[in-house]
């Protein structure tokens, strides 16, 4: 099949393209399909005009402007439409049907020759990321998304929360696919039994608060005084005792840091945005065989399986005690690490690609 993925933005700042679209596209290309990813890099001007061929996938970044504003670029829209026509896809799957991506698929939704699908991987309404947009931009994005959800052949959703939301808009569920983010399992699980008592916090800071982290961490330290907190990500985390901030790392460095840890900690908040997301960083930890201590909030409670300890939301004492048990009980930590690694195999991107292809085939 000739399959076109359409992105909502570039790759320099946000994670939908590198962490969701591209792994799916690579896995589908490996199964013999022709994949192109169309990326409107309005937020990453240096990417505009590039065409890259890698792992059987063509990444096309149409040239920008000239335009009065990055989000008002008629030439970018025109070039995207030309790229769609040139590729002649059988299937178009748009990831976040807002902005240029939502505009480009609008005429395709009426084209009987093309099957159009929509993917939702975050909450874009006022309760989610829409809160960061002004009123007008939020209203336009909401109208685009709802129209696309209703008119598309089907909708894939990265979380149960989003799937339920989609089904409410479409008033039907048979063509809604639950498609969480995937993992790339390591060859072997990390040696968590012999690693130092390093607690890894891997986050961009969107799903937790500094006060909750401090409460949980100080309770852990009271029982495990040798523990160290290693923070990975571009979040400005609080300066806590025995903590080290790695900051933003390249993928190879992230893997190295994860494999040095004993456990991963996710003290997440119970809000709509967190319930809606599919936590790629949690999956990264599972893929390296790191036991997880987290709260039962959305996908955080669903994805780990037996690969850690999932505590009722809002119970900071119980979350701290779960982390303490994993740190102090070496056999428990060892078994949980192996279970985490095995669980990651059920989330392999290759399996996700096969699920998606089967879903396409069921909705010809």
Image (spheres, helix red, strand yellow):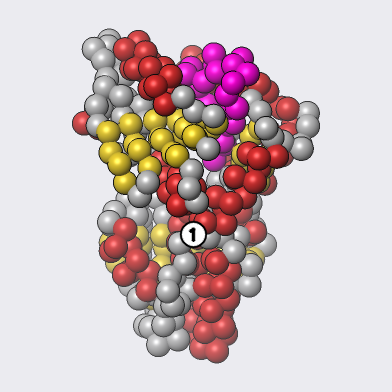
Residue 324 lies, in percent from the top left, at 52, 79
Q: Crowdedness of circle 1 by 10 Å Cα count: few (<14), some, many (20+)?
A: many
Left/right placement of residue 166 relative to residue 43 reads: right
Task: Please state which of residues 322 and 254 is positioned toward the viewer in this rendering.
Answer: 254
* SS category of the residue bearing label 1: loop
Decide whether residue 121 is among the magenta residues.
yes
Residue 47 placement: quadrant: top left
Identity of the residue drawn at 52% across and 84% down: 334
Q: Quadrant of the C terminus?
A: top right
Task: Please state which of residues 240 and 144 is positioned toward the viewer in this rendering.
Answer: 144
Residue marked by disc 1: 183
Q: How many numbered callouts?
A: 1
Tell me, yes or no, if residue 134 can be seen here: no
Left/right placement of residue 314 relative to residue 289 reads: right
Q: Is residue 261 above or below residue 99?
A: below
Q: Is residue 84 above or below residue 252?
A: above
Residue 284 lies, in percent from the top left, at 45, 61
Residue 254 lies, in percent from the top left, at 33, 63
Q: Which residues are magenta?
A: 95-122
Left/right placement of residue 86 relative to residue 339 reads: left
Decide whether residue 57 is among the magenta residues.
no
Residue 118 placement: quadrant: top right
Identity of the residue drawn at 67% across and 62% down: 312
Identity of the residue drawn at 55% across and 89% down: 331
Residue 51 lies, in percent from the top left, at 27, 33
Tell me, yes or no, if residue 90 can be seen here: yes
Task: Please state which of residues 301 and 76 is positioned toward the viewer in this rendering.
Answer: 76
Q: Is residue 178 above or below residue 364?
A: below
């Amino acid at each position: 099949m000739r399959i076109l993925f359409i992105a909502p933005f570039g790759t320099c700042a946000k994670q939908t393209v590198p962490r969701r679209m591209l792994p799916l596209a690579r896995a589908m290309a490996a199964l013999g399909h022709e994949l192109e990813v169309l990326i409107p890099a309005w937020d990453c001007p240096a990417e505009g005009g590039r065409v890259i061929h890698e792992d059987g996938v063509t990444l096309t970044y149409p040239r920008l402007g000239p335009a009065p504003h990055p989000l008002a670029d008629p030439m970018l829209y025109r070039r995207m439409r030309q790229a769609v026509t040139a590729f002649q896809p059988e299937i178009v799957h748009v990831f976040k049907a807002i902005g240029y991506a939502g505009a480009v698929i609008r005429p395709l939704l009426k084209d009987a020759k093309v099957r159009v699908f929509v993917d939702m991987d975050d909450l874009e309404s006022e309760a989610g990321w829409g809160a960061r947009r002004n009123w007008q931009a939020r209203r336009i994005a909401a109208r685009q998304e709802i129209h696309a959800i209703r008119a598309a052949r089907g909708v894939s959703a990265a979380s149960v929360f989003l799937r339920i939301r989609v089904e409410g808009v479409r008033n039907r569920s048979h063509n809604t696919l639950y498609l969480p983010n995937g993992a790339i399992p390591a060859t072997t699980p990390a040696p968590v039994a012999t690693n130092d008592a390093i607690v890894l916090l891997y986050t961009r800071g969107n799903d937790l608060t500094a006060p909750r982290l401090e409460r949980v961490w100080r309770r852990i330290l009271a029982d495990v005084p040798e523990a160290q907190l290693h923070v990975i990500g571009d979040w400005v985390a609080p300066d806590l005792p025995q903590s080290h901030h790695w900051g933003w790392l390249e993928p190879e460095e992230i893997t190295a840091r994860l494999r040095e840890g004993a456990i991963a900690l996710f003290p997440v908040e119970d809000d709509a945005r967190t319930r809606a997301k599919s936590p790629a960083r949690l999956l990264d930890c599972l893929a390296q065989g790191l036991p997880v201590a987290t709260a039962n909030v959305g996908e955080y409670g669903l994805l780990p399986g037996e690969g850690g300890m999932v505590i009722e939301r809002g119970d900071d004492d119980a979350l701290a005690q779960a982390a303490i048990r994993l740190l102090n009980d070496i056999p428990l930590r060892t078994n949980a690490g192996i279970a985490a690694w095995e669980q990651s195999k059920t989330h392999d991107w290759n399996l996700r690609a096969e699920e998606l292809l089967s879903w396409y085939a069921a909705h010809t």
